[in-house]
Image: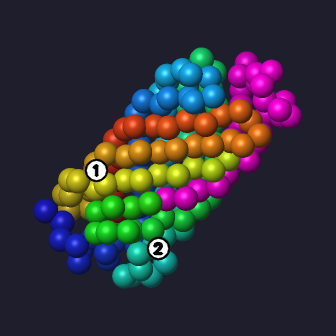
Amino acid sequence: MLHAEEHNHARNEIGLSGGTIYDFDHSRWGGGVHLHYFRRLGEHSRWSLGAGVEQVWDDGRHFTLALGTKFEMLEKLEFGLMPGLTFFSHDDVHDDHEHGADAQFSLHLELVYDMLHWKYFHAGPAVDYSWVPLGGDAHIMLGVHAAVCF
C-alpha cells in the first residue's frame, strides 16, 4: 500500500477515466474516455495544474482539449476543473447548436476517489460532468479512474 506521505511526494500524474455517459440535451447514452496529465505545484501542495483530452461517443461524437487545475480535497478525494474547447464532428453539428460552429468553449468537472493504491498507481470511481454552453451539450460520465504517479 502507498502511504499518504509517499503519495504526496509524487509530483506528476498521468490518468485515464472511462465510463458510460448520459447526454442530457439529447437524452441518449454513450461512452467516453478522458486522459489527463497533472503536475503538483509543490512537493506537498494539494494543487496541480494540467491538461487533458476527452473523447465522447454517442449518436454523435466530439472531443475536448482542456487546461485546468486539480485540488486534493481529502487524502483520496480530488476535484478537477478544466475549461477548454470542444470540437464537434461535422456529422454531429445539430440544428440545436446555436452558432453552428465546430468548436465551442466547454467546462469539464471531475470528482475522483482514489480507492485503491499500489506503489505509484491508484484507481477508483470517477464522476465527470461536461458542459458546452453554446454547443447544446451537457453530459455526465460515471466510470473508473486509474493513474500512474511519478
Is residue 114 positioned above or below 142 on the image?
below
Q: What stretch of residues is rendered in magenta?
A: 80-105
**Residue at the left extreme of this rendering:** 1
Pinpoint residue 82: horizontal percent, then vertical percent.
59, 56
The foreground one among 21 and 41 is 21
**The image quarter in which residue 144 lies:** top left
Q: Is residue 104 above or below residue 32?
A: below
Would residue 51 be visible to someone looking at this image?
no
What kind of element bears circle 1?
strand
Seen at 54% across and 20% down, the residue is 28
Q: Which mark is residue 139?
A: none
On the image, the x and y values in percent for residue 118 come to 19, 57
Amino acid on which the number 2 mark rests in the picture: Trp
Label ID, residue 123: 1
The residue that mark 2 highlights is 47
Neighbours of disc 2 within 10 Å: few (<14), some (14-19), many (20+): some
| The C terminus, quarter of image | bottom left
The quadrant of the rendering that contains the N terminus is bottom left
Q: Percent position (x, y) of residue 18? A: 41, 37
- Identify the residue at image location x=37%, y=46%: 126
Q: Residue at x 38, y 69 (%)?
A: 73
The location of residue 124, given as percent across then percent down, is 28, 48
Tell me if residue 31 comes above or below residue 34 in the rendering: above
Query: Is residue 14 or residue 83 the one in the foreground?
Result: 83
Name the element at disc 2. Answer: strand
Q: Are marks 1 and 2 in contact (CB under 8 Å)?
A: no
Report the residue at 32% width, 69% height from top: 74
Amino acid at the residue labelled 1:
Ala
Q: Is residue 147 left or right of residue 61?
A: left
Q: Left or right: 127 with respect to 76? A: right
